[in-house]
Image (tube, rainbow, N blue to C red):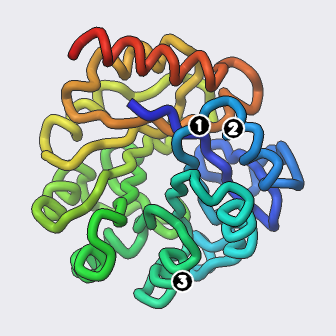
Amino acid sequence: MLVIPAIDLKAGQCVRLRQGRMDDDTVFSDDPVTVAGRWVAAGAKRLHLVDLDGAFAGEPRNAQVVKAIRKAYPDLPLQVGGGIRNLETAEAYVNAGVSYIIIGTQAVKAPAFVSLLCEHFPGQVIVGLDAKDGKVAVEGWAEVSEQEAVTLASTFEGLGVSAIVYTDISRDGMMQGVNTPATVSLAEAISIPVIASGGVTNIDDIRNLCDVAESGISGAIVGRALYEGSLDLTEAQQLSDQLLSNRR
C-alpha cells in the first residue's frame, strides 16, 4: 500500500485546508518544489498534487508549480487534480510528464468525460470522489450533490480507471483518523482500487488501513499529519511494505 504525501497548492504555496474550506488554510511553505524534495528524500513512491485554486476556477492555476516539481524529480510518479475539466487540460498535464490525472467535478457532472479520458490516456486516469455523509461533493467541495459515492463509483467499472481517491470531507485536515468503514465499503463494492484520503493522523491509521488492504485499498494520501509531524513518512511506508509483505 502506497503512503502518498499530499501537496495542496494555493497561490503557488503549499497549504492544507480544514474540511476543504479555502478560508481555513495553513501555509506550510512558499516553495512546493522543496517540499516535494523533502518527501522524495523520505522515500515517497508517489506524490499527490492538488491545484486548489484550479478546483474552484475550473481550470489550472498552479500548473507551473506542478511542472517545476516534475522537472526537479522526473522519475517520481505524480498524480494531479484540480481544474481538469477538458481534454486539452488533461493532455497538457500528461505531455508535461504527469503520471496520473485526477478527475473530480467532471466525473460527477459528466461521467462520459472519464470514459473519453480513459480512451486517450489508458492507465493514467484516477477518479476523485469527495464525500460528505456519503454524498459526493463537487466544485472544490463547495457543492454537495445528491449522488451516493458508492453508486457513482460503480458507473466507472470497466472503463479503465486506474484508481478512485475517496475522501471523507468531514475528516480532511482535521486529524481525526480515517473513515475506514466507509472506505472499506466502497472498496468492497467495486473492483477498482481505492486510495484512502482524509484524516490520516498517525501510524495506527496506516496500520489499520493495511489490515483491510485486501478489500481493495491500494494507498493512503497523507497531508497535515506529515506537515505537523504526527506521522513519519519513512516509518509509515516501511510499515506498510512490511505488513503487506508478511501477508503474501
Other residues around mark 1 within 10 Å, as few (<14) / some (14–19) / many (≥20): many
Residue sitting at x 23%, y 79%: 119
Q: Is residue 19 left or right of residue 132?
A: right
How far from the left and from the top, in percent, is residue 70?
65, 63
Other residues around mark 3 within 10 Å, as few (<14) / some (14–19) / many (≥20): few
Q: Residue furthest right?
A: 30
Q: Is residue 244 above or below residue 2?
A: above
Circle nearer the N terminus (2, 1): 2
Q: Is residue 39 left or right of residue 121?
A: right
Residue sitting at x 63%, y 78%: 60
Q: Is residue 170 above or below residue 211?
A: below
Marks 2 and 1, how far apart at CA: 5 Å
Q: Amino acid at mark 3?
A: Ala
Give SS at disc 2: helix
Marks 2 and 3, how far apart at CA: 25 Å
Q: Amino acid at mark 2?
A: Trp
Q: Are marks 2 and 1 in contact (CB under 8 Å)?
A: yes
Residue sitting at x 78%, y 45%: 35
Residue sitting at x 79%, y 54%: 32
| Closest to the observer, 244 or 19 | 244
From where the camera sits, is residue 172 visible?
Answer: no
Marks 1 and 3, how far apart at CA: 24 Å
Q: Which residue is mark 3?
A: 92
How far from the left and from the top, in percent, is residue 51?
64, 65
Q: Which residue is mark 1?
A: 44
Q: Amino acid at mark 1?
A: Ala
